[in-house]
Image: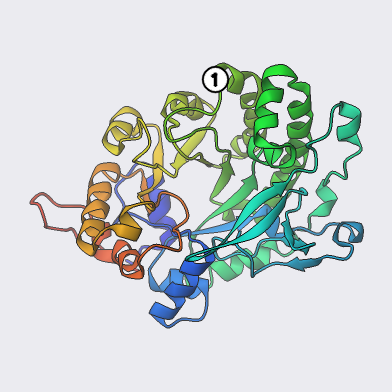
């Protein structure tokens, strides 16, 4: 009997061995274009189908509908900008040569040897010195979003067979500092936490309302809720555990409780060395951790699987900084096999890059990573691979 993508992922996340390890793909726009050319297809969705990728994503910022005053003399762009890393559209406002997101954070487009990226350059709340200043800001509210098209998007994703679909909520701390400034936000948390608290609370209200709307509209067709908030560097946390517990964790818990109350599993994204927080993340209801940057401190996949594998699943792991741009095809294949063997034992793993695949990555290495045969776990002898039913 044919195994669907959705069934494969749900089996893995239930910590049972699926027919093969499921996979996911996230990449910068330049990589998507190279893959479309290499595979001779005309869309990102066609790339995902050709590579037999199991996961899809829908996002809150695919459904922005702000009032006309927000757009003013700018131009809304959904498809062609550096922030679009998956197949769905993403709202951006092009104004004064800057890209502005729905919250008002301003980024400039920077060219580099392989393409382009966004860089934060203006923080609209940088000069705020009181709660009164913050109240005067033109804050997004739930009526700035229109999710009426979501059922059609979900149906479209399932057109050629059911995929595993997650809903991307948005972030709290990360969005807060994109409005206030990174250094200033950390200083505020230490010296005047009422300012970042107010910012995060305004974001929290919108995210909760959006999540409730999406889960009501989609019913059981949202398989997982996806939340992101970077809290770590490659060597340590960005702040003390005590600061996180006091200022950020309670708000994260309040948001994620909406998903827990409805029985939705939760995926959490945090770059870098997050291992110290993993026990508390599990207590918060996190069941899938991304992106597993194995070159970060204390993020060895064998240790993670041994320590947390019975309670937590893993998403990611394939190095994007050295392996995909600089490694050989054989090295890529060996690393994929290793991750499939280690993290995929007994289920609990989704093969994916350890962040968005970057524009300097070699196309042949990306295609090697997504060879379907590599997703089957060894049956015992090294080099012998179990072949299940491939969709």
Q: Residues within 10 Å of mark 1 (few under 14, many from 20)?
A: few
Q: Could you tell whether 82 is left or right of 369 in the image? A: right
Is label 1 in a helix, a strand or a loop? loop
The residue that label 1 is drawn on is 240
Q: Where residue 350 appears, x then y in whole percent?
A: 38, 50
Q: Residue at x 64, y 41 (%)?
A: 171
Residue 65 or 328: which is nearer the viewer?
328
Res 239 seen here: yes
Whether residue 387 is visible, yes or no, is no
Where's residue 155, x and y in %?
A: 60, 67
Q: Position of residue 267 (x, y in %)?
A: 51, 42
In the rendered view of the protein, which quadrant contains the C terminus?
A: bottom left
Q: What quarter of the picture does the N terminus occupy? A: bottom left
Percent position of residue 23, x then y: 38, 57
Residue 125's quadrant in the figure?
top right
Nearest the camera: 323 or 62? 323
Looking at the picture, the colour scheme in use is rainbow
Residue drawn at (65%, 35%) of the image: 182
Task: Determine whether 299 is above or below 108 in the image.
Answer: above
Q: How many marks?
A: 1
Find the residue positioned furthest to the left. Answer: 381
Tell whether 35 sits left or right of 374: right
The residue positioned 35% from the left and 30% from the top of the image is 298
> 108 or 177: which is nearer to us?
108
Camera-side residue of 74 and 275: 74
């Amino acid at each position: 009997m044919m195994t669907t993508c959705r069934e494969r992922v749900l089996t893995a996340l239930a910590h049972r061995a699926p027919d093969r390890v499921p996979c996911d793909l996230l990449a910068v726009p330049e990589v998507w274009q190279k893959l479309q050319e290499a595979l001779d297809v005309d869309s990102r969705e066609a790339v995902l189908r050709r590579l037999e990728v199991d996961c899809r994503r829908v996002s809150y910022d695919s459904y922005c509908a702000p009032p006309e005053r927000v757009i003013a003399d700018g131009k809304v762009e959904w498809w062609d900008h550096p922030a679009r890393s998956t197949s769905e559209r993403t709202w951006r406002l092009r104004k004064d040569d800057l890209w502005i997101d729905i919250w008002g954070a301003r980024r400039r487009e920077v060219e580099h040897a392989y393409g382009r990226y966004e860089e934060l350059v203006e923080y609209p709340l940088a000069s705020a010195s009181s709660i009164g200043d913050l109240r005067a800001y033109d804050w997004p509210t739930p009526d700035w979003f229109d999710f009426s098209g979501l059922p059609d998007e979900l149906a479209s994703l399932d057109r050629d067979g059911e995929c595993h679909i997650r809903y991307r909520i948005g972030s709290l701390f990360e969005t807060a500092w994109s409005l206030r400034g990174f250094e200033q936000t950390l200083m505020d948390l230490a010296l005047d936490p009422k300012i970042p608290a107010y910012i995060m609370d305004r974001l929290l209200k919108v995210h909760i309302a959006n999540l409730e709307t999406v889960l009501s509209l989609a019913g059981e067709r949202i398989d997982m809720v996806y939340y992101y908030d970077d809290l770590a560097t490659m060597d340590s946390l960005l702040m003390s555990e005590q600061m996180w517990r006091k200022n950020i964790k309670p708000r994260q818990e309040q948001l994620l409780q909406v998903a827990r109350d409805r029985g939705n599993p939760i995926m959490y994204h945090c770059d870098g060395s997050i291992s110290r927080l993993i026990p508390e993340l599990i207590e918060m209801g996190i069941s899938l951790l991304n992106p597993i940057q194995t070159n970060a401190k204390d993020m060895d996949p064998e240790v993670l699987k041994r320590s947390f594998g019975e309670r937590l699943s893993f998403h990611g792991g394939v190095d994007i900084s050295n392996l995909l741009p600089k490694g050989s095809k054989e090295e890529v294949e060996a690393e994929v096999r290793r991750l499939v063997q280690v993290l995929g034992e007994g289920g609990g793993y989704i093969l994916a890059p350890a962040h968005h695949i970057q524009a300097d990555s070699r196309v042949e290495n990306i295609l090697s990573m997504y060879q379907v045969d590599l997703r089957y776990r060894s049956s015992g002898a090294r080099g012998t691979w179990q072949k299940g039913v491939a969709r």
